[in-house]
Structure formats: structure tokens, C-alpha cells
Amino acid sequence: MVTPLVNAQDGKPNAGALTAEQAKKLKNPVPYSKKSIAQGRGLFIRNCAGCHGNDGKATVDVIADATDLTAPKTWKDGTSDGEIFRSIRDGQNASMPAFKTQFHEDEIWGVVNFIHSLWPESMRPSLQDKESTEPEHGKSK
């Protein structure tokens, strides 16, 4: 029997490891906003920077095969929101631990949003902040 992608009662991913196909179907419920990026960045710095570096470029010498998060075209395990979520939540073989017991689901989605912010500008999602369409204080048009 195949484990359903989401729990029928609350719509959240099931506790078991997600398959690649299930991960591709997941949609990020947390808006790509300055707030979610900042929250994800805090978790990333505390939990992920040791291997991926503060800038996500994986130039630290701790793990030779850590993914450069700024170059999504080189990724082996997919770049969709759900695939990134799966990598964080369920880990990647022996090279990356699973974080499903350390992070709440919304926190993982925040890290997904932060990772998107590391991508080349042309590949990033559009910010969903209401204030992002308003002029910044002190700047003239």
C-alpha cells in the first residue's frame, strides 16, 4: 500500500519519508515574503551553515559533497518547493541528516523560502509582501 502524500484530516505531509513523486506534488503554504525568508535564514544559519556556509555556497571544508544552494541548476534531487522540503525534512542519505524532528513544518517551508532567496535573481519567485510594492521610506522615484 502506498502511503498517502498528505494526512486526509489536516492536509499536512505524513510522518513517513516522502517519495520523490510525492515531494514534486507538494506546494509551499508559506508565502515567499521578507518575513518568511528572514525566519528561514535564522534557522538556516543555526542549523545548516555548518555544511552549506552562511552564504549557501558550500565552500566550507566540513562536507565535500554539500550542495551549493546558490546554483540550483546543478542540484541532483530537484528544485521544486516540495523537493527542497523533502531534502530538509527527510535528509539526503548519509550526507545530510533529516530535520523533521528539529523543525516544525512551517519552519521547513521558511528555510525553503530562504534557499530560494539565494538563487540567481532571475530564478527567484516573486515576493508576496504587500509592502514590497510600496516605495521604501526615504527613497524617491
Image: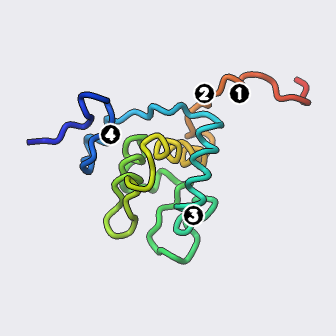
Dot placed on the residue nearer the N-terminal end, 1 or 4: 4
Task: Please indicate whether residue 127 sits to the left or right of residue 30 in the image.
Answer: right
Image quadrant in which the C terminus is located: top right
Distance, label 2 to label 1, CA atoms, is 7 Å
Task: Please indicate whether residue 56 sits to the left or right of residue 91 in the image.
Answer: right
Residue at 56%, 34% in the rendered image: 32
Q: Are marks 4 and 3 in contact (CB under 8 Å)?
A: no
Picture coordinates of residue 25, whole percent (x, y): 31, 35
- Element marked by disc 4: helix
Dot placed on the residue nearer the N-terminal end, 2 or 3: 3
Residue at 40%, 65% in the rendered image: 96
Residue holding disc 3: 49
Distance, label 1 to label 3, CA atoms, is 27 Å
- Element marked by disc 1: helix
Question: Amino acid under label 2?
Answer: Gln
Question: Amino acid under label 4?
Answer: Lys
Question: Amino acid under label 3?
Answer: Ala
Report the colour scheme: rainbow
Distance, label 2 to label 4, CA atoms, is 22 Å
**Front one among 83 and 35:** 35
Dot placed on the residue nearer the N-terminal end, 1 or 3: 3
**Front one among 124 and 86:** 86
